[in-house]
Image: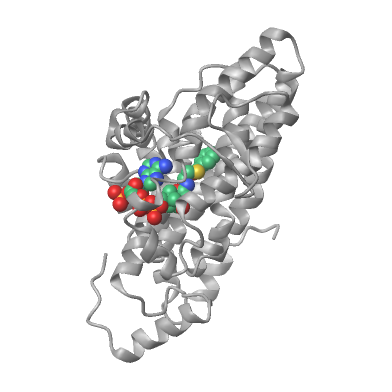
Amino acid sequence: MTQQPAPHSQDQLHFDQIIEEDSRIEPRDWMPDGYRRTLTRQISQHAHSEIIGMQPEANWISRAPSLKRKAILMAKVQDEAGHGLYLYSAAETLGTSRDELVEQLLSGQAKYSSIFNYPARTWADIGAIGWLVDGAAICNQVPLCRCSYGPYARAMVRICKEESFHQRQGWEILYELSHGTPEQKQMAQEAINRFYGPALQMFGPPDGDSPHSQQSMAWNIKRFSNDELRQRFVDMIVPQAEALGLHFEDPDLKWNEERGHYDFGELDWAEFRSVIQGNGPCNSQRMQRRRQAHEDGAWVREAAAAYAQKCADAVQVDSRPGALNTSMEERTPAHV
Ligand code: BYC
């Protein structure tokens, strides 16, 4: 990443004014190094999460219970790859190349969301991932559509639209199971028992243990704190679970009339820390698979680089005075 010279006070004033007006910072604008670093970290971790997040669901493509379910799941997994690509592109506008960002993931230096270190054991888990994991993602990401950094905010608009679709498909899988045989309903219940805690942890540590929240909120990167969004999510999913005929196995989960919100139990933060330190049930499997996929894709990157070089060389040749027309004719197929 390029180090910036000390800011002219005019630059800082301009930046502060944009934030104050709740307007957008664009890549060409001056920005404090800390702002650039925070965004590069958050956006790249988000991109890595989308890419690693393909794995638990992709494992079920060949076992989806019908052709229709298989087609839907393939489309969803493909959407996640697309989200990763928009996000790497947004992160690159801050001055770090995609190669470097990917290297940070592969070397274990960069984080990705804790949730993807849990296995998808049954088909109902695919429903729970869609409903709860994509649901939490939407809750967290809708406010990011108003993030102060333009390229991230714009990427989030499209991502959120697609995530809504994903959540809906998860809900529908669970609805069918919970209205099926007693065994199917049991499978749905067990899936949400497994994913409830980890989904709530996606919002990050409690506010008191979140080192980045305060500054990120002052810069209008984050619009709400981790705990505020977690609460919003709980308030949303409790009635949805009731509509599914399922429940959350949290003895402290109850409506608090005074607060106008659901109270819920303390999450297992020791487990959360252990998972993000690399000791979750699937961390090593996820990273091993990603490294293998990266190696397997080396030939594609080499071919793309060779093709880009060929195009660049052709442009150089064509730019000789008087050479453009001839070479354009040569390269234009006769039928065009
Ligand atoms: N997992 O100060 P804090 C998706 C890290 S959805 C792992 O609160 P911040 C998808 C945090 O990075 C999932 N690490 O940080 C859905 C920081 O680490 P370092 C991805 C976590 O950034 C369906 C440290 O803990 N979504 O992709 O202010 C299918 C302190 O935390 C987690 C996003 O990335 C976690 N759960 O707030 C497929 C959304 N939580 O680097 C894919 C964008 C915290 O300082 N990101 N950490 O050591 C955000 O909104 C914010 O980055 C967070 C954390 C709310 C996640």
Residue 146 in the image: x percent, y percent?
56, 65
Would residue 46 be found to the left or right of residue 128 on screen?
A: left
Residue 210 in the image: x percent, y percent?
35, 52
Q: Is residue 112 visible?
A: no
Q: Nearer the viewer, residue 254 or 24?
A: 254
Q: Is residue 217 visible?
A: yes
Q: Nearer the viewer, residue 152 or 321?
A: 152
Would residue 115 be found to the left or right of residue 137 on screen?
A: left
Residue at 32% x, 43% y is 105
Residue at 64% x, 36% y is 75
> Which quarter of the rendered picture does the C terminus lie within?
bottom right
Residue 222 lies, with reference to residue 253, above or below; the image says: below
Q: Quadrant of residue 298?
A: top left
Residue 294 in the image: x percent, y percent?
36, 37
Q: Nearer the viewer, residue 137 or 255?
A: 255
Would residue 150 be found to the left or right of residue 5 on screen?
A: right
Residue 137 lies, with reference to residue 272, above or below; the image says: below
Please identify the residue farthest to the front as the structure is shown.
258
Would residue 1 be found to the left or right of residue 326 on screen?
A: left
What colour scheme was applied to this rendering of the protein? one colour
Residue 76 in the image: x percent, y percent?
61, 36
**Number of marks in the rendered image:** 0
Residue at 47% x, 74% y is 26
> Which quarter of the rendered picture does the N terminus lie within?
bottom left
